[in-house]
Image: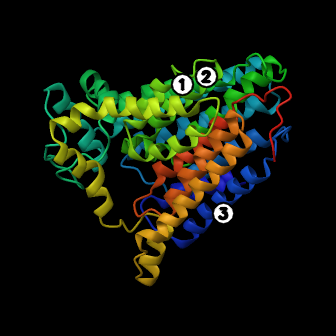
Amino acid sequence: MLWLAYLGVLQWSVVRFRFPIVITLSVAATGLGVWLWRRSEIRSVPPLLAPTVLVASVVITWLVPLFSYLRGGSLTASLVTLSVVGLGGAALLVQPTAARARTAYLLAVLGHVVTATIATIGDPAPKIDVWVTLQQASDALARGENFYDMNWTDSPGIQDAFTYLPWTTVLLAPGRWIGGDVRWALAFWSVVLFAGIWALARPRRGDDESSMCASALRAAIPVTALVVAPGTLTQIDQAWTEPLLATGIVWWAVLVRRGHAWWAIVPLALACASKQHLALLLPLLLLWRPFGVKRAIATGALTGVLIAPWFLASPKDFVHDTVTLLVGFHPIRFANTWYLYFLNEHGITLPFWVTGIVVVGALGTAAWLIHRRQPGLDELLRWFAFVLLAANLVNKQAFYNQYWLSAALVAISLAVPARRHQRAEP
């Protein structure tokens, strides 16, 4: 099961480099690529597949080394909560009905909120620069200061740069202002993500006929699988922000499905104005006719408008923090990528053009096939996942959270109902 292997080694990967991890991630990327190339449809699955994945996720979470600053009762309570979600969801989905699927979905959402609450209270000051910079950037935003022109206090990593795009702070700052911790806002946006998956799974005109049970299962299975995915507790504790990006993408997808493609620009632009690598998705959207060139350009333009105040306040600081620092940043030795494999194992620093070939190759292949096939929304989301995954595998700074986003996009794609008489070119 590639899902379990992929996320299982990702839990193990924090904070260590191992060649088998890189191999497993590469096999998963290859499997996703083969699925996309062959366009295999999921017409039916074994009835015990989803329960098995949930139970196995719980087992992996307990058995595989888990990195967390939580200790004692807080760590145990978090793991028990995730176990209740996984085992309870599995029991409900063994012989699913619409009511049981809805219950599994609600159990997963509630379980995530409880886990986030335990982690936030149990570890009030995680020793990671991500959390420190987000906290202090939120304070700077409240004071009307430019957080691209600051030095951080007590940061265990980066001291003088804010490496995210500005809307990461804008969207997470209310958690700091209201509850004292940006992770409260991350928990909120995660719930919005789960609500988006539910909305995406709802049938629309033109979809294949499906029962109420099938519709509920399309939402319950991805949400429950994401909530109990191995490594989730680490992501919550560390304040990694990829759930924010997934939220923007899922609501973009919901609005496109509902015929509001122009409004879909807003959540997508907010996501693009939060983290740089989502720019890789815009060339794909240029070629996908249901969204189209005008809307893709408008998304880029709105993203520019959203980040403009910070750029104009100090162009030099903004470009340094969000571009040049990252390009020139030293490789982090526990990033499980091919770049780090050659560096760690052979002392070879891959030239930029080598990694560029991989990224451009993946992006070009995806763009060509999207232009030719004009796939459904579900396949498009999987192409997003593939391109981001390929870029991560040759990056010098890719970790659990970046890889998690690709897994989340695949899970989200499974919520999209099949279209009636949908038949695309091979």
Q: Secondary structure at mark 3?
A: helix
Q: Is residue 387 above or below residue 30?
A: above
Is residue 97 visible in the rendered image? The answer is no
Task: Give the tally of numbered discs.
Answer: 3
Q: Is residue 377 above or below residue 394?
A: above
Whether label 1 touches label 3, CB < 8 Å: no
Q: Amino acid at mark 2?
A: Leu
Mark 1 or 3, which is nearer the eye?
Answer: 3
Name the residue: 75% across, 22% down.
Answer: 215
Mark 3, other Cα within 10 Å: few <14 / some 14–19 / many ≥20: some
Residue at image mark 1: 110
Name the outermost residue toward the front: 294
Residue at image mark 2: 106
Whether label 1 touches label 2, CB < 8 Å: yes
Q: Of label 2 and label 3, which has the lower sequence position?
A: 3
Name the outermost residue toward the bottom: 346
Residue at image mark 3: 27
Question: Where is residue 370 shown, x and y percent of the image?
Answer: 67, 44
Q: Secondary structure at mark 1?
A: helix
